[in-house]
Image (spheres, grey):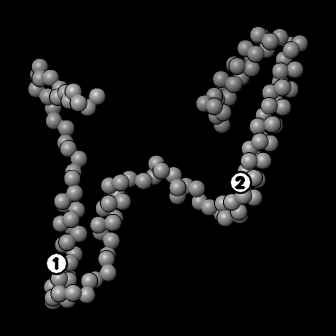
Amino acid sequence: MELFGINGSELLILGLIAVVVLGPEKLPEYAQKLAQLIKSIRGYAAGAKERLREEVGDEVADMDWRKLDPRQYDPRKIIRDAMLDDEAPASGPASPSASGGSAALAAAAPAAALSALPTVATQTQLAEGELAPFDSEAT
């Protein structure tokens, strides 16, 4: 278990340094202050959580917060999924099903739309002695 990026052995070394620097007389006093600080922080967090639950309601407790994590969103995937979604067929002559078009034509439309999406540019190797491109307006 890591706390603030400090593993068990590093915590032990920090404890030994604290014993040497503070001395055995003041160490219990500072340990007690640290324990009180941790208890007060936990109390503040619990109070804030309870206040949020009172103000917003119990639906917050049931909410899956991982769904709202912005790191999970990939714009390319969202666009691809939106383009591949089956839309309701239009009720006009322009629709392939209304004009007697084949199902293969309807299935080819999303594939054609995907091929029209911009692709990631491939990296090319620079020749020996060639300078990298520089855009003075990009900085």
Above or below residue 102? Residue 109 is above
Above or below residue 88? Residue 138 is above
Tag of residue 105: 1
Horizontal relation, residue 49 to residue 79: left or right: right
Q: Earlier in the sequence, mark 1 or mark 2?
A: 2
Horizontal relation, residue 16 to residue 71: left or right: right
Residue 107 visible to the viewer: yes
Q: Position of residue 96 (x, y in %)?
A: 18, 83
Graded by Cα atoms within 10 Å as few (under 14), some (14 to 19) or many (20 or more), the crowding at tag 2 reads some
**What residue appears at the point 32 percent right and 60 percent down from the top-left corner?**
79
**What residue appears at the point 22 percent right and 57 percent down from the top-left corner?**
117
Tag 2 residue: 52
Horizontal relation, residue 126 to residue 81: left or right: left
Residues 53 and 23: in front is 53
**What residue appears at the point 16 percent right and 35 percent down from the top-left corner?**
124
Amino acid beneath label 1: Leu
Residue 97 visible to the viewer: no
Eye-nearest disc, 1 or 2 = 2
Q: Position of residue 69 (x, y in %)?
A: 51, 52
**Residue 4 position by quadrant:** top right
Calculate the distance from the C-alpha at mark 1 to the C-alpha at mark 2: 53 Å
Amino acid beneath label 2: Leu
Q: Position of residue 8 (x, y in %)?
A: 68, 29
Q: Position of residue 47 (x, y in %)?
A: 78, 47
